[in-house]
Image (cartoon, helix red, strand yellow):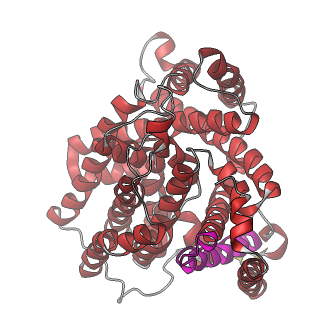
């Protein structure tokens, strides 16, 4: 329990100290922000700082710091270290720069940011990648809650017990939330759900202490405790994404970059929301380690809805069950609607379609939600299976984070600032991403790994680990070689700054 409290203290201290280092490295000033200069009453709207924080937290969190952290508990309390230091030195840095670089460039989407600092090829890759990823996230976060609502209403009469009814209802809400100005729905309901997410984490933490559960110490369990022997590197780093670092956050941060009144709000809004998510993830990881053995947790399916329900029931009783059901339904919905909204904005930046008019928004809302509806209905009818496709999300998510960190490193080079603050986590995430691509059974692992007679997977780490390290070193070398070949000022002037 001492190690949990130490990690919690480090996370809080990290916000005040390292978060300030990150902010000072970027150097926010008093320039007019896009929310003030462009203000279109739709996507560029000045919001109060507390709303910016709560919306950002819901945008980036959803169920990520809950499901991912509980699944991370399969490796034991060593997961606390990744959540703590990953949040401070990687996730918080990633979220801050993805938000502030967007703010410095008129609130454009992360694909455009990548193009500005990494070139046109990367911009086009990121455009396609971002839209596909966001539509997929939005669709899955419609299908999932619809299934849960169907389960809850299985004994209800008529259409209330139909998954298709709930799916269509959620998609209709997504269309409205994607179409209307950000302060009409998202700005009003997100703070409420954000408070519920925080209360749920606090309730679980209090319940662990008051119900007599014991959180195991890191130093007594400094080993891989996964019941199937799945390697810590890089599976744990991929599994616990939103609770440490997540590329999906980079697609969401521009939403708030368009609503900030001052650049100096970035520390609280972007870095602060990531630290808060890290704290939430730490609590849920502690719950997983304290309440279950690894085998029991695996038998329950890892960090799924069933486990969340069980944890809330054991730590908070009836109130916990109500919060759990609200959380596992509302949290994915609050990530799904902003995923579709972000997809609209990526397309708007891509094809230069203004979004102030109703016509401009409908031009993109209809096809984006149309594709989401086709995919969602296909799943509800049993025609489309997302299981295999969704496995790729974890890897692509962290790969996106890697790209964003390299873009931030190039920005800092152009600004003649300490680019190592982003280059080091970029190199680390490059190693994580490439190693997992080599080992993951949905990637090259299906060719490199093999199974024993009893079905256990033997991972080919002898090949994957060196390849991951060499690839990361190569990426760093390319970056260092690239900046040495550039004339800083002329190159920077071509960026449209």
| Res 454 visible | no
| Residue at the image point whose x is 60% and y is 18% from the top | 357
Residue found at the far left of this picture? 210
Name the quarter where the N terminus is drawn. Answer: bottom left
- The reply to whether the magenta stretch includes residue 378 is no
Q: Locate residue 65 relative to residue 17 in the image: left or right.
A: right
Judged by its main secondary structure, the magenta piece is: helix
Image quadrant where residue 457 sits: bottom right
Name the quarter where the C terminus is drawn. Answer: bottom right
- The reply to whether the magenta stretch includes residue 417 is yes
Foreground residue among 25 and 14: 25
Q: Locate residue 7 relative to residue 459 in the image: left or right.
A: left
Q: Locate residue 290 relative to residue 170 in the image: left or right.
A: left
- First to last magenta residue range: 412-439
Residue found at the far top of this picture? 158
| Residue at the image point whose x is 44% and y is 12% from the top | 157
Q: Position of residue 371 (x, y in %)?
A: 72, 28
Q: Position of residue 147 (x, y in %)?
A: 53, 32
Image quadrant where residue 279 sits: bottom left
Q: Position of residue 481 (x, y in %)?
A: 77, 82
| Res 135 visible | yes
Q: Position of residue 356 (x, y in %)?
A: 57, 23
Foreground residue among 247 and 376: 247
Q: Is residue 226 above or below residue 160?
A: below
| Residue at the image point whose x is 24% and y is 81% from the top | 2
Q: Is residue 48 above or below residue 376?
A: below
């Amino acid at each position: 329990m001492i190690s949990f409290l130490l990690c919690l203290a480090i996370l809080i201290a990290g916000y005040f100290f390292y978060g300030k280092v990150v902010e000072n490295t970027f150097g926010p000033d008093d320039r007019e922000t896009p929310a003030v200069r462009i203000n279109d009453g739709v996507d560029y709207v000045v919001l109060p700082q507390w709303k910016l924080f709560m919306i950002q937290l819901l945008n980036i969190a959803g169920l990520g710091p809950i499901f991912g952290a509980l699944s991370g508990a399969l490796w034991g309390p060593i997961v606390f270290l990744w959540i703590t230091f990953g949040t401070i030195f990687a996730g918080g840095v990633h979220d801050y720069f993805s938000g502030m670089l967007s703010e410095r460039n008129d609130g454009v989407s992360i694909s455009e940011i990548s193009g500005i600092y990494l070139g046109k090829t990367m911009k086009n890759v990121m455009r396609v990648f971002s839209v596909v990823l966001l539509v997929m996230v939005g669709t899955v976060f419609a299908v999932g809650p619809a299934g849960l609502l169907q389960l809850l209403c299985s004994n209800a009469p008529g259409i209330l017990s139909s998954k298709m009814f709930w799916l269509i209802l959620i998609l209709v809400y997504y269309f409205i939330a994607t179409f209307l100005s950000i302060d009409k729905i998202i700005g009003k309901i997100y703070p409420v759900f954000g408070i519920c997410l925080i209360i749920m984490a606090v309730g679980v933490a209090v319940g662990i202490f008051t119900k007599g559960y014991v959180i195991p110490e890191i130093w007594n369990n400094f080993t891989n405790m996964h019941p199937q022997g799945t390697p810590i590197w890089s599976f744990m780093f991929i599994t616990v994404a939103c609770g440490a670092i997540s590329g999906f956050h980079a697609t969401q941060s521009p939403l708030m970059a368009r609503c900030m009144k001052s650049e100096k709000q970035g520390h609280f809004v972007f870095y602060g929301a990531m630290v808060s998510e890290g704290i939430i993830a730490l609590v849920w990881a502690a719950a997983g380690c304290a309440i279950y053995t690894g085998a029991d947790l695996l038998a329950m399916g890892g960090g799924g809805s069933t486990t969340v329900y069980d944890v809330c029931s054991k730590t908070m009783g009836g109130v916990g069950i109500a919060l759990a059901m609200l959380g596992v339904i509302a949290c994915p919905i609050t990530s799904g609607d902003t995923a579709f909204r972000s997809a609209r904005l990526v397309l708007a930046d891509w094809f230069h379609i203004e979004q102030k008019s109703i016509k401009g928004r409908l031009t993109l809302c209809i096809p984006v939600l149309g594709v989401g509806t086709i995919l969602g209905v296909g799943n509800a009818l049993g025609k489309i299976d997302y299981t295999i496709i969704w496995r790729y999300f974890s890897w692509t998510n962290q790969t996106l984070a890697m790209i964003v960190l390299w873009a931030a490193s190039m920005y800092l080079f152009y600004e003649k600032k300490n680019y190592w603050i982003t280059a080091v986590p970029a190199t680390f995430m490059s190693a994580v991403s490439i190693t997992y691509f080599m080992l993951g059974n949905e990637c090259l692992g299906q060719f490199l790994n093999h199974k024993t007679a009893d079905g256990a997977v033997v991972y080919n780490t002898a090949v994957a680990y060196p390849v991951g390290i060499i690839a990361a070193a190569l990426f760093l070398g390319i970056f260092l070689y690239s900046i040495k070949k550039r004339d800083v000022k002329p190159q920077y002037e071509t960026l449209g700054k």
